[in-house]
Amino acid sequence: MTDLLIKPEEAGAPGKTGAETGADRYRLRQLALKSIEIIKAGQAPGGAIVACPNFTVYRYCWLRDGSFCAHALALTGSKEEAAAFHRWVGRVLENHREKAEAVLRRHKQAEKLTDGDFLNTRYTLEGLEEAPHADGEEWWNFQLDGYGTWLWALGEYLTRHPDAALRQELAGPVELTVQYLSAFWKLPNFDCWEENRHDIHPATLAAIYGGLRAAARLYPESAICAAGNRQASALATFVKKAGIYNGSLVKSLGRSDVDASLLGAFEPYNLFPLRGQVARSTLARIENELVAQDGGVYRYRKDVYFGGGEWLLLTGWLGWYYVRSGQRDKARACLKWMVKQAGDDGQLPEQVSHFLLAPEHLPVWETRWGKSAMPLLWSHAMYLILYIALYGEDNI
Ligand code: BGC
């Protein structure tokens, strides 16, 4: 995809942009088209979207990754495919209803629960929980943010493409999800990087907040969704009280460091106003502590996963925030940085290793799981979301 690459001098760090030429726009659009193709190719006949087709441990559908991919498809004219994903999630939830209702009941009775009692963060493309692994390795499945992300993405979809039948079809799964998130948001669970099981993460809470609010808007007649909306308000109060340190949101309660996934608290989940004080302080920390010298974004300073590289999806997310807060030049620089990372075939990786935070850890992960994931469909989704935010749906 060399022909899609922009010239290095045109792609500075956020804030430093060269003038945009027609050729740049052409290249940016080519990668957008390629991204749609890659996400569609990763969608199984039943609607599930794989995280990465050729990285063994990512050959599953995560609600988190899949929801962003479905959102990107909905924005770029692939309405049917997006709806198929939402229907697939609806079926997965119905098929696991008994499990969800059991954990809700047992929680109410104050029974002791284990991680395996909760819904999984990812499923096989057929919608099943994965079989136990031969090596005994278990996935870090107790994560709540993906369920919030799904409700948010469904809300976006149905607002953009009203569809009474789909809304009706998904009412049951949505209410089940709302009950589940309303009951469990206060529990520590793995963060969106599948780490820190025993902490509570404002970024996870933000996704839950965005999801509960979206469900209440979608189903104003539902008492369950109205109750979920009240939980969302309680959650917001809780984060304001416990999730802020020196004016900025923190990675986990009780810590003082920052994590780039906190961008979600502003865009798209709107837990805090986009241009408010909390957003400004948190963004200042993300820009100072988590943007590498070439403009790519780290997850958090102590990251060691595959050496702790710059993440494509986070750079797209930062750009998305910039567009929404009126900083378009910085947003364009993020998009251009993403294009520079594409392989010759237009594939975007999960992360790049130009400026690793912990290089000594790279070989450890490569020995364990092979080369880092590529293409990562969530990276392509964030590219598309940023592209559309900048150039509009008519430019695809
Ligand atoms: C990331 C998750 C992601 C998963 C699949 C993990 O390494 O930490 O956020 O959902 O990969 O892409």
Image (spheres, rainbow, N blue to C red):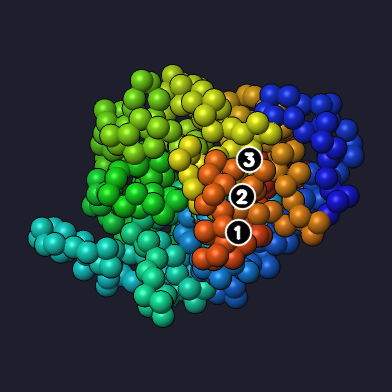
Q: Amino acid at mark 3?
A: Phe
First in sequence: mark 1 or mark 2?
A: 2
Res. 290 in view: yes
Quadrant the N terminus occupies = bottom right
Q: Which element is circle 3 on? A: loop
Front: mark 1 or 3: 3
- Residue 159's place in the image compared with 336, above or below, is below
Which residue is disc 3 drawn over?
Answer: 355
- Residue 188's place in the image compared with 239, above or below, is below
Q: Amino acid at mark 1?
A: Ser
Which residue is disc 2 drawn over?
Answer: 351
Question: For the point 66% across and 60% down, which residue is it?
Answer: 375
Which percent across, then down, holds residue 164? 49, 59
Q: Amino acid at mark 2?
A: Gln
Which percent across, then down, holds residue 194? 41, 54
- In the visual, does 100 lie left or right of 264? left
Front: mark 3 or 2: 3
Which residue is disc 1 drawn over?
Answer: 372
Check whether the beta carbons of the residues at disc 1 and disc 2 lie within 8 A of each other: yes
